Image (spheres, grey):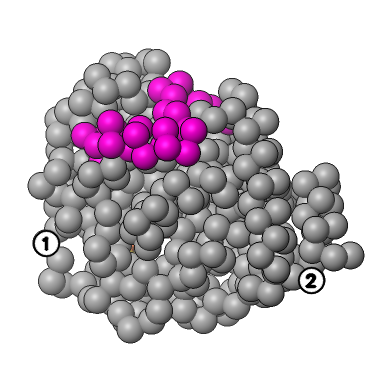
Amino acid sequence: MNPIELIDKLEQDHILGHSDFLRLLSGNLLPDEALYLKQRAREVTDRTFGRKVRIRGLIEITNVCRNNCLYCGLRKDNRILKRYTLTDDEILGCCKTGHDMGFRTFVLQGGENPAITAEKVTNLVSAIHDRYPDSAITLSLGEWDDYSLKMFRDAGATRYLLRHETINPAHYSRLHPDEMSRDNRLRCLDTLKQLGYQTGTGIIVGSPFQTLDNIAEDLLFMRDLKPEMIGIGPFLPHSLTPFSSYRAGDLDLTLRIISILRLMFPHANIPSTTALATLHENGRCLGLLAGANVVMPNLSPPDMRNQYSLYDNKAAFGAESAEGLKALSSQLAKNNLYITTEKGDYSDV
Ligand code: 5AD
Ligand code: SF4
């Protein structure tokens, strides 16, 4: 089969074999083949969501993390970073600002901060759920035991983001210290699914030592997991990590993977990520045009944003921010895309 036939097959069957995925991932597609992949992915996105882009308000609740992922600027060995943890009142204030602006999803994201206990998270989720019963609460707070994940679900969280980062065990162990376990992350993903969370996973594209083979394995893993949300962004080096001198991930490869995922998962919520917007000035729109349907403007208190430094130069202001919703709207309008303030659950299509 030629690449055009492979793309048609992927659209029809939502899956390819490992070697066929590799052919679409490799940079060898002709320009019209690459364009066709993108066009089919956007066409499928249009069929599911129209030209609507769903917005989620991102609140970075703490940059304290007990983990030491080698790629991440929040890793605990980064002693230079000034750490912060928002109070419940500050977080509720962010929700209020966001709700007034039309946001109907709040994403609470943070490092694995031992001071934020399961009980605290549960109380916070309950408080947000009480005040904003029309809004969805998404958690992105790393790994927890099954019982805690159930408490959060019972308190009103309905979505959880936990990227698997890479499914290949050897690759996983080159990105993470020995104390971290790929299997524990997979256990969490399995629990999230069983608890009825809309579950998000994903990878960093172009992380050190990653091969196209690894990415093909990740795609096959995601086929099995059936995530409702998928976060894909390029690797970006952070100067205060062991990976400071590694190259950033490739824009075109990231966009191709978004398109492939859209053809695999026509109904999934796929954000055009901040990492993509940081890599390229028009990255946000390029991601949407390649098949993404979600953007996550930053609702964190502006004076804390620079401290949530997963990687260098992370975009958090202007069209990346909640205050910049107008700027974002006009960027999108140029591409015939429009923000919707609908809650936008997985099943709402
Ligand atoms: N480059 C790109 N993405 C990163 N993340 C963490 N560090 C980096 C980096 N240097 C991603 C991880 C994590 C998410 C919150 O941010 O995939 O799951
Ligand atoms: Fe902590 Fe997440 Fe960064 Fe890993 S990627 S160091 S778990 S904040």
* Relative image position of residue 281 (x, y in whole percent): 34, 56
Q: Amino acid at mark 2?
A: Ser
Q: Which residue is identified by label 1?
A: 82
Q: Is residue 104 above or below residue 272?
A: above
Residues at badges 1 and 2 in contact (C-beta under 8 Å)?
no
Residue located at (28% from left, 77% from top)? 241
Badge 2 marks a residue whose secondary structure is helix
- Classed neighbour count for the residue bearing mark 2: other residues with Cα under 10 Å, few (<14), some (14–19), many (≥20): few
Magenta stretch: give its range.
321-346
Residue located at (44% from left, 24% from top)? 340
| Spatial CA span between label 1 and label 2 | 45 Å
Q: Which quadrant would residue 312 be assigned to in this image?
A: bottom left
Residue 320 visible to the viewer: yes
Q: Is residue 99 above or below residue 278?
A: above
Q: Which quadrant would residue 127 be assigned to in this image?
A: top left
Instruction: Determine which of the numbered discs, if any, sits on residue 19 in the image.
Output: 2
* Relative image position of residue 249 (x, y in whole percent): 46, 70
Furthest toward the right, the residue is 1
Mark 1 vs mark 2: in front: 2
Residue located at (42% from left, 33% from top)? 333
Tell me, yes or no, whether the highlighted magenta stretch contains residue 79. no
Q: How many marks?
A: 2
* Relative image position of residue 213 (x, y in whole percent): 67, 75
Q: Is residue 87 above or below residue 177?
A: above
